[in-house]
Amino acid sequence: MAKLESKIPEGEISVKWSKYKSKIKIVAPHNKRKYKILVIGSGLAGSSAAASLAELGYNVHCFCYQDSPRRAHSIAAQGGINAAKNYRNDGDSVFRLFYDTIKGGDFRAREANVYRLAEVSVNIIDQCVAQGVPFAREYGGYLDNRSFGGTQVSRTFYAAGQTGQQLLLGAYQALSRQINMGTVKMYPRTELLDIVVIDGKAKGIITRNLENGKIERHFGHAVVLATGGYGNVFYLSTNAKNSNATAIWRAYKKGACFGNPCFTQIHPTCIPVSGDYQSKLTLMSESLRNDGRVWVPKNKGDNRHPSQIPEEERDYYLERRYPAFGNLVPRDVASRAAKERCDAGYGVGPSKMAVYLDFASAIMRYGRMEANKLKLENPTDAQIKELGKGIVKEKYGNLFEMYEKITNENPYEVPMRIYPAVHYTMGGLWVDYNLMTTIPGLYAIGEANFSDHGANRLGASALMQGLADGYFVLPYTIGDYLADEPTTEISTEQTAFQDAENAVRNKIMQLLSIQGNKTVDEFHRSLGKIMWDYCGMARNKEGLEHALQEVRKLREDFWKDVKVLGKNESFNQSLEKAGRVADFLELGELMIIDALHRNESCGGHFREEYQTPDGEALRDDENYCYVAAWEYAGDNNQPILNKEPLAFEYVKLTQRSYK
Ligand SMILES: Cc1cc2nc3c(=O)[nH]c(=O)nc-3n(C[C@H](O)[C@H](O)[C@H](O)COP(=O)(O)OP(=O)(O)OC[C@H]3O[C@@H](n4cnc5c(N)ncnc54)[C@H](O)[C@@H]3O)c2cc1C
């Protein structure tokens, strides 16, 4: 059984990190270049880590499957990044960000890690500003802030609706500088297919060159997985099409424990599914809930155009149910509330599986403010509306444009139609306070680890965590491990490398040799449907047990009937996808097992059997206040459950309330 040593430092929470940093082992500058660190991933977590480690003097090799590091999925992030700067003077503090995050995650995250995250959040903004990231500014020149769900302050920094893109360009510049100096060697279009473990420690990786199929071995004194989340196990999600679980899944099969695999975030504001042909869903950023009001008609099956439905016949159900947080309740709460209304027959649009996100009152409110500023006397409604639209365009213009392009409806005139969709995975590789997995020398950062978000991530906290891990945590903590490692390199001729390479080759050959009748996408789509129907926004024992059998059957069928086109020795997307879907088919099963064992509801994990009389998640702190860290026990064996108990010293365990 794996030993879960969380390595939480002693001491008062506000000084844990600073004291720890000054005491952990470090590597002397002249020795750093003797250590080779393999960083897999070039999203916000990977780029920031690779650049920072190289800046410190380590010899870094960085891998990604895109043609350029700056095309990583992080570039899609829209709404913003949190930091406890209190620029708005609205009562924010490191403690409040820590508190909001613990509560938002429904008390299933580690206090010490979350406090550290809140603490370093302020440094991230300074770092990014210094890099030239063009955060939105107020008229006076200060950085602007807006609100995201689950908070009552404005602490989200943003760059229009393209925050991820701008942050990634910042990190990419820092990375490029190191690539240019030769301190980072970049391997684009290269996919990790296995981890090499020697004497219980991570010592390298096996990769496939996606252009020509070449399988290669790489030695590293440490390996860092910054490979993102696994939301695409559901087939339809807001994630980039290529985001996948292969790196963390293969690490799991080499002995790294997988933390809370069933904790998935369903984002409330996405463009609804419109047909079977779709392969991707589009997010409408949470920032829109700053100004958009969510509603459905009060009467079931009301088919009138939204403009024909008078105010008194509209149900602003989030404002009604959660007056304190209103439209800005956390994502799990908002998603469930939308599902509840649609399931009860109040949904809108052709599928009736949508609710309105309406900007009409915000447009008029901003318009009146502008008219006042301009000293317009008796402005008409039409004038006010035009002025208001201008302000809304400044704030959310690119998101409105994206919505219109996809739906052919103008959201300045007609409310958006939205519905929840899979967005983020809180589960991931279990890591200790140093961000090291249960395999010594193997680290996981960013969305790839089980992370600081508990059972539900608050909006704008993923970018914060990825950059905290990459810029400010890992560069310190990795030294604690490397300081005791010999600087000598291990030859990649060793048997462990040979065996890992053989296993990779065999799997590829097996996939290519089946030559069945169904495409990889057909299997992926079927898996996604099972996962969404039974292990999605709402789960129950019966459904999960059914899903377990279904996934097992599907996996068996996959290995008999999948058709993978082409050969290994060339650019072959069919083969790439097949390997990833094979892993999703195994991961899906672990997610179901995890969801089945957790007989409580918390955050995004909503077991229908465990809810309060008014339909909120009902935790069972007595029996489930732990991180479930699953350990691989062989292909046909039940995985082993390891538990890391969670202690709450600084935040009281209470029933989460946003009322
Ligand atoms: C549409 C959208 C909008 C979002 N908006 C926000 C927001 O406003 N604020 C916020 O905080 N969060 C947001 N998020 C979440 C956030 O974008 C992600 O959680 C975050 O960017 C993940 O960063 P990462 O560095 O961990 O991984 P990623 O950006 O996913 O990067 C993964 C990297 O790993 C590489 N990789 C993966 N597997 C392999 C392999 N086997 N071999 C080699 N390389 C591999 C990839 O090539 C890539 O470089 C949003 C997410 C989506 C989908």
Image: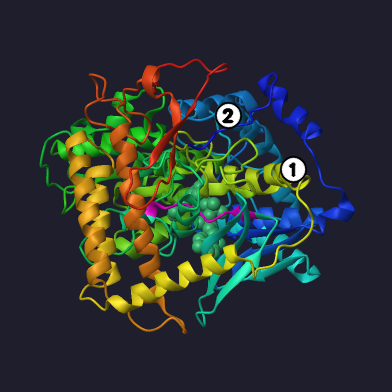
Residue furthest front as drawn: 495
State the image coordinates of residue 453 (x, y, percent, origin top left): 49, 36
Q: Nearer the viewer, mark 2 or mark 1?
A: 1
Crowding at label 2, few (<14), some or many (≥20) Cα neighbours within 10 Å? many
User: Which image quarter: residue 593?
Assistant: top left
Residue visible at 52% across and 42% down?
A: 460
**Residue corresponding to mark 1:** 476
Mark yes or no: residue 152 visible.
no
Three-letter amino acid code at the position of disc 2: Leu
> Mark 1: which secondary structure?
helix
Q: Foreground: 251 or 260?
A: 251
**Residue corresponding to mark 2:** 97
Three-letter amino acid code at the position of disc 1: Tyr
> Mark 2: which secondary structure?
helix
Q: CA distance from mark 2 to mark 1?
A: 23 Å
Mark yes or no: residue 496 visible.
yes
Residue visible at 50% across and 24% down?
A: 646
Task: Magenta stretch: give its range.
Answer: 223-231
Q: Foreground: 442 or 106?
A: 442
Q: Foreground: 474 or 333?
A: 474
